[in-house]
Image (cartoon, helix red, strand yellow):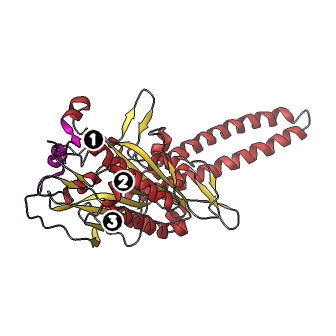
């Protein structure tokens, strides 16, 4: 949730953020009204409670003759207090609903607009010129015996797959390399639960307009996570952290699940857009003052991983309308996919400022010992989709695929060759 102090002091900043996202600025006025109403309800309830308490003291001091009338007044006042408290609870609920309807305030400098309004910040590497017709990752994967979509669909339905043989080793190698790099850079490695409670999923901002993409187990009222960002954000919920020695950095290795609602007909071939995948995700708790610098560090660590698999990529500054409700700023690294002659997202790193931590009540103590809302950030370090760029960019004319040097120790070979 956004900072209500910012809303009260400069609502135009929040309205501008809503417009940049393509969202309704009138929600800002609704939140202002709910905030005013809630503060009025609190004041009324507090005043009535104080009057009721004072009247109770009068009853205690009253004479026998005065007491019946005062008791009657106290009972009437008690009814008014209960009514005021009920009104306060209703105002609290209205404020919470209006507060949760507002997305995080977009950081200054982020481009306005939607999915296609990103800005390219840098292009790294040059797309390879093939002297043969390059195959797509699925054709390569099937010929190499590393991807089996047909049996994935037989067992689980569309957008499921098996990674087989060296395909499984490639993914495990990618994730293990990511884990090693994360630990070397001060991250605590985590294998988190992939089922979370509603308050944790809501706290990270995934039950808003994108809730249709989340798998919900109705009988248990639990959610399957689409990223280990979710359980890692909930890891310190309701706590006061010690950030005196610097940021708390975690790297979560987990399977992830997405319904891909609204993506009918998009990327149905291969493993670009699937219902289940594995990922190593960086997650950081820090102070709001350090969040921007930490965001750049996360991007730098993603770049290290992309350099290790040796694929051309570009870095984009994601437009406000494509940020997701929790992010104030997001940078994506998109790898070159030769069969599509375009760049596709491989990593994403988001600065969520205090938005998630405010929902999840994650705080730290400032230099004066006063609790303050922490900032949270996240970033992808490796995921199943990377196999798409890896296979296509390193394919050879004979159908084999070169294994990047950094992955050879994990895979056990430097070249993948077609079966038979």
Q: Name the residue under label 2.
A: 409
Relative depth, front residue between 97 and 420: 420
Q: Do the residues labelled 2 and 3 touch (CB within 8 Å)?
A: no
Left or right of 391? Residue 204 is right
Q: Name the residue under label 3.
A: 307
Q: Is residue 335 on the magenta stretch?
A: no
Query: How far, Cα to Cα, is label 2 from label 1?
Result: 15 Å
> Start and end of the magenta stretch?
130-150
Q: Where is residue 98 in the image (x, y as percent from the top left)?
A: 46, 50
Of badges 2 and 3, the one in the foreground is: 2
Labelled disc at residue 165: 1
Within 10 Å of the Cα at label 2, are there few (<14), some (14-19), or many (20+) other Cα atoms? few
SS state under label 3: helix
Residue at 64% across / 54% down in the picture? 240
Residue 372 appears anywhere in the view: yes
SS state under label 2: helix
Residue at 57% across / 48% down in the picture? 237
Going from the N terminus, do you reach mark 2 or mark 1 first? 1
In this picture, is 382 found above or below 197?
below
Of badges 2 and 1, the one in the foreground is: 2
Relative depth, front residue between 252 and 418: 418
Q: Position of residue 145 (x, y in %)?
A: 20, 42
Q: Where is residue 398 in the image (x, y as percent from the top left)?
A: 11, 54
SS state under label 1: loop
């Amino acid at each position: 949730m956004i900072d209500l102090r910012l809303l009260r002091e400069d609502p135009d900043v929040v309205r501008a953020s809503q417009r940049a996202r393509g969202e309704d600025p009138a929600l800002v006025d609704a939140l202002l009204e709910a905030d005013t109403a809630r503060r009025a309800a609190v004041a009324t309830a507090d005043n009535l409670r104080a009057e009721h308490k004072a009247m109770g003291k009068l009853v205690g001091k009253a004479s026998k003759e005065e007491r019946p009338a005062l008791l009657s007044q106290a009972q009437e006042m008690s009814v008014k207090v209960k009514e005021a408290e009920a009104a306060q609870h209703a105002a609290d609920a209205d404020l919470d609903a209006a507060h949760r309807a507002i997305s995080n305030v977009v950081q200054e400098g982020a481009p306005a607009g939607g999915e296609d309004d990103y800005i390219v910040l840098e292009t790294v590497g040059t797309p390879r010129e093939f002297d043969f017709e390059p195959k797509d990752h699925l054709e390569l994967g099937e010929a190499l015996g590393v991807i089996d979509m047909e049996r994935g669909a037989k067992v689980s339905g569309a957008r499921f797959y098996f990674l087989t043989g060296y395909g499984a080793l490639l993914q495990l190698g990618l994730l293990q390399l990511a884990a090693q790099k994360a630990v070397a850079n001060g991250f605590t490695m985590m294998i988190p639960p992939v089922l979370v409670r509603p308050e944790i999923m809501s706290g990270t901002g995934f039950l808003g307009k994108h809730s249709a993409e989340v798998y919900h187990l109705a009988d248990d009222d639990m959610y399957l996570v689409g990223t280990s960002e979710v359980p890692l954000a909930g890891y310190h919920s309701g706590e006061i952290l010690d950030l005196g020695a610097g940021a708390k950095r975690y790297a979560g290795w987990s399977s992830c699940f997405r319904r891909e609602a609204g993506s009918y007909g998009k990327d149905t071939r291969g493993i670009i857009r699937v219902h289940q995948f594995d990922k190593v995700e960086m997650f950081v708790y820090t102070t709001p003052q350090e969040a921007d610098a930490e965001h750049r560090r996360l991007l730098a660590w993603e770049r290290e991983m992309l350099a290790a698999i040796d694929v051309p990529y570009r870095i984009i500054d994601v437009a406000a309308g494509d940020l997701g409700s929790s992010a104030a700023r997001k940078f994506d690294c998109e790898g070159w996919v030769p069969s599509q002659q375009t760049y596709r997202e491989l990593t994403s790193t988001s600065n969520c400022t205090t938005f998630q931590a405010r929902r999840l009540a994650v705080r730290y103590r400032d230099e004066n010992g006063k609790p303050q809302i922490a900032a949270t950030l996240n970033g992808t370090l490796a995921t199943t989709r990377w196999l798409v760029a890896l296979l296509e960019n390193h394919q050879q004319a004979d159908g084999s695929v070169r294994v990047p040097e950094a992955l050879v120790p994990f895979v056990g070979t430097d070249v993948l060759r077609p079966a038979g």
